Every structure is written in C-alpha cells, then in structure tokens.
Image (tube, helix red, strand yellow):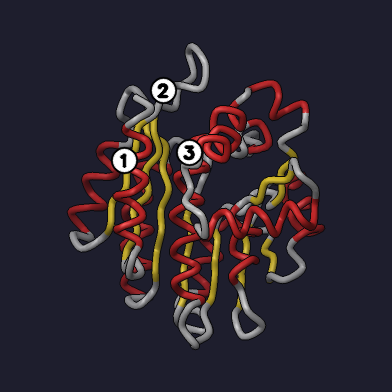
Amino acid sequence: MLSYQHAYHAGNLADLHKHALLATALSRLAAKDKPFTYLETHAGRGLYDLGSAQAARTGEAAAGIARALDEGWLPAGHPLLSALAAVRAAHGPDAYPGSPLIARHFLRPVDAAHLAELHPAEHAVLASVAGFAHLHYSDGFQMANALIPPTPRRGLLLIDPSYEIKADLARLPGIVARLARKWNVGVIALWYPVLPDARHAGMVAQLTADHPQALLSQVGFPPARPGHGMVGSGMLVINPPFGLADEAQRLAAVFARLR
C-alpha cells in the first residue's frame, strides 16, 4: 500500500482536467470578500519537476500540460495559467503545481488550508513547500471528518485518492454523503479515473443518485501509451461555484477533439 507516486504522472491529461476545474472553483471562492477554507484528503508532494527522470519516463506531461500550452487549450487569463505562471516564477520553468500549490495561489491571509498526506516521502516534500497550510500526516478521510464543518465555514474540499486501495470505489459514496450532510454549504469535489473496465461506473451512479444537483464533468482521452489503463478523468462537484459548469462544458469540447 501507499506505493503510488504522482511524479510519474504530474501534468498529464487527467491533471489538466482536474486542475483546470479546481483553479476555476478556487478563483470563484477568492473573488468574494469572505474567508474560506481549503481542505485536501490526499495532497501528494505539492510540487513536481517536469524535467525529472520520472516525468520523462512516462511522457505524460508532454502529452498533457506541455501540449495544452503549445496549442492554447487554456484561454488567456485562465486561473490555472495564472497559478502555473506563479509557481514557475518561483521554482523554474519545468515546475508544475500539484493541487496544494494551485490552492496556495488563490488563498489570502484570511483563508485557511488543511492538507493530509500519508505517504512518508510525499509528505516530507509537501512539508518543504506548504508552509502556508496546516499539514496532517494522517488518513485524509479521517482528517476531513474531524474538521468538517471547518472554520471558516465557507470553502472547498478536494478528495483525490490514488485508488490503489480497491475499497475506495465502494466506500466513497458513503464518505461523501456523510461529509455533505455535515457541511451543506461546502464545495466538495471528488476526482476519479476513467478506466476501460468502467470500474468507476457504480460509484458514479450512486454519487449522482445521492447528489442530483452536483456537477459531473467526465472527459475521455487516448491512453498515454499502449497498454496504459487510464482513458479519461472525472470530477463530481457538490455545490459547484457559479461558472464552474461553463468551464466543464468548455473542457468537454477541448477533450472531445482528442478522441
């Protein structure tokens, strides 16, 4: 367990989908003159080097964020572009922000952040770049259950597990339902991979039945290389901020051209 390391996959097409939606949602929260809390159950290391041997080995960043920048998939002024520019100004041209540093770009002094990461090596790197947040070397679901509803009460929770624990697909609808009951004003975003065997389908069906007003954004794309298992990316968002549905629709059109 806990073998997954995102350095091999950072900046891939799934990250592009997920992070474009996340940055848009956070920019909407930050646009209002009210404090908010950002929470993340599986934060990873927070900062990635797309020039690393791990990134070169898979080539996923080249097919993802690098191609997106070359071909203009993100319009000028997009929140993800501003977060990426800030991180590269601070850490170099090959840097890529994980969700914690994307959140950092939009957080203000009045806002709060809580990040959980249980992988020891990933947590150690996260601690070196996420001094702005409360770090939790603990199970992310336990952290979320303990802190929700947070202070400030307005905010966003990102649930982004690796799914290396097979039981996650079965238990996530119950976890999300419990958190949504405790935090009825919170934005709760759950990311999941789309795989050829459609193992995600039962979870998504239960989630959409439980939360019929939630935004569901699911896109498909070619496998990164022959035999690669992931063929799409999904995000379900409870209480989506205004404008997020428009971004989901725009992304759907972008990804439809890749099929």
Residues tagged 1 and 3 counted as in contact (Cβ below 8 A): no
Type of residue at label 1?
Answer: Ala
Image position of 161 (left or right of 237): right
Q: Which residue is mark 3?
A: 14
Image position of 97 (left or right of 18): right
Residues tagged 3 and 2 counted as in contact (Cβ below 8 A): no
Q: Which residue is mark 2?
A: 222
Residue 253: assigned label = 1
Query: Which residue corresponds to the image point at 46% horizontal and 83% vertical from the top-left?
Result: 32
* Above or below 101: residue 121: above
| Depth check, front residue: 192 or 259 | 259
Q: Is residue 25 visible?
A: yes
Secondary structure, mark 3, is helix
Q: Position of residue 139 (x, y in %)?
A: 58, 56
* Above or below 6: residue 43: below
The N terminus lies in quadrant: top right
